[in-house]
């Protein structure tokens, strides 16, 4: 069996370049991240021991990174138990961060979209997959990063909690809320901030001792 190449970034040893590219993506979005911060004993559930890939404290989300062709419902079930136990949320992402952009612009939606799902934390038995696709996206009024169904940026902030940088009219004028982002939902999985972060992750080089700089 062919193994992924271990990759170093910011002092961490990632088991694959794919994981390292996600760390770069989070950095470029200004999101704090912890890589494999804690393992969990799920043997009572018949699921063995489990070490989730990332925790994003800013969003209270666990992120499990899988290759874009993965087909493993057990991954959702494991993550669901962890998210429920830690009073957080969980998302399984499939492939490199740029797929977020493709899904956000509704390219290849029916393909990868059925794998970028959150996990069910409400059911005691943690059925696994809950809903999707959930994408990294941007509030059109304050540029806050969030994770929302279909990348609906309008859901990130409540009116009371939004640290607005611009009015709705200004957001419309900039294309952050309107035709470019598909109407009043402010779909923004392909927002320029997301694109820039995904491109940085995609272009990072790790060969010959390089440390992930584009």
Image (spheres, rainbow, N blue to C red):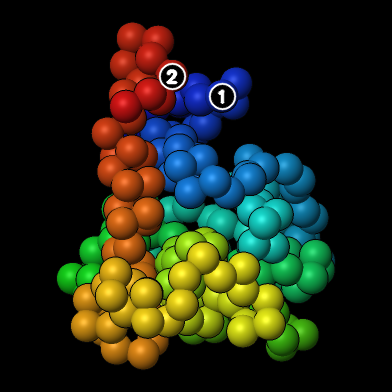
Q: Is residue 157 above or below residue 83?
A: below
What is the x, y in percent for residue 117?
47, 74
What is the x, y in percent for residue 116?
42, 69
Decide which of 155, 12 is in the foreground and name it: 155
Q: Is residue 171 left or right of residue 105?
A: right
Q: Is residue 121 visible?
A: yes
Q: Is residue 33 above or below residue 88?
A: above
Quadrant of the rendering where the C terminus is positioned: top left
Q: Residue at x 72, y 86 (%)?
A: 122
Q: Is residue 11 left or right of residue 202?
A: right
For marks 2 and 1, the one nearer the N-term is: 1
Q: Quadrant of residue 60?
A: bottom right
Kindly identify which numbered label has been placed on residue 10.
Answer: 1
What is the x, y in percent for residue 59?
64, 62
Marks 2 and 1 close (CB-CB < 8 Å): yes
Q: Is residue 114 visible?
A: no
Q: Quadrant of residue 213?
A: top left
Q: Residue at x 77, y 53 (%)?
A: 40
Kindly identify which numbered label has been placed on residue 211.
Answer: 2
What is the x, y in percent for residue 153?
45, 75
Quadrant of the rendering where the N terminus is positioned: top left
Q: Residue at x 32, y 79 (%)?
A: 172
Element under disc 1: loop
Taking the view exactly as shown, the residue that stands out farthest to the top is 208
């Amino acid at each position: 069996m062919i193994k992924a190449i271990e990759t170093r970034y910011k002092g961490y040893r990632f088991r694959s370049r794919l994981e390292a590219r996600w760390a770069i993506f989070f950095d470029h979005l200004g999101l704090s991240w912890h890589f494999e911060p804690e393992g969990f004993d799920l043997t009572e559930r018949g699921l063995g021991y489990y070490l989730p890939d990332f925790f994003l404290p800013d969003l209270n989300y666990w992120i499990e990174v899988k290759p874009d062709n993965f087909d493993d419902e057990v991954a959702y079930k494991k993550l669901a138990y962890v998210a429920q136990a830690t009073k957080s949320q969980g998302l399984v992402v499939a492939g490199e961060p740029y797929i977020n952009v493709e899904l956000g612009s509704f390219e290849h939606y029916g393909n990868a979209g059925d794998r970028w799902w959150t996990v069910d934390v409400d059911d005691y038995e943690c059925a696994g997959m809950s809903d999707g696709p959930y994408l990294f996206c941007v509030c059109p009024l304050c540029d806050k990063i969030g994770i929302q169904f279909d990348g609906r940026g309008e859901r990130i902030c409540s009116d009371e909690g939004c640290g607005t940088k611009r009015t709705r009219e200004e957001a419309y004028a900039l294309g952050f809320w309107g035709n470019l982002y598909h109407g009043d939902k402010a779909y923004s999985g392909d927002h320029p901030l997301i694109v820039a972060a995904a491109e940085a992750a995609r272009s990072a080089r790790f060969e010959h001792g390089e440390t992930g700089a584009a």
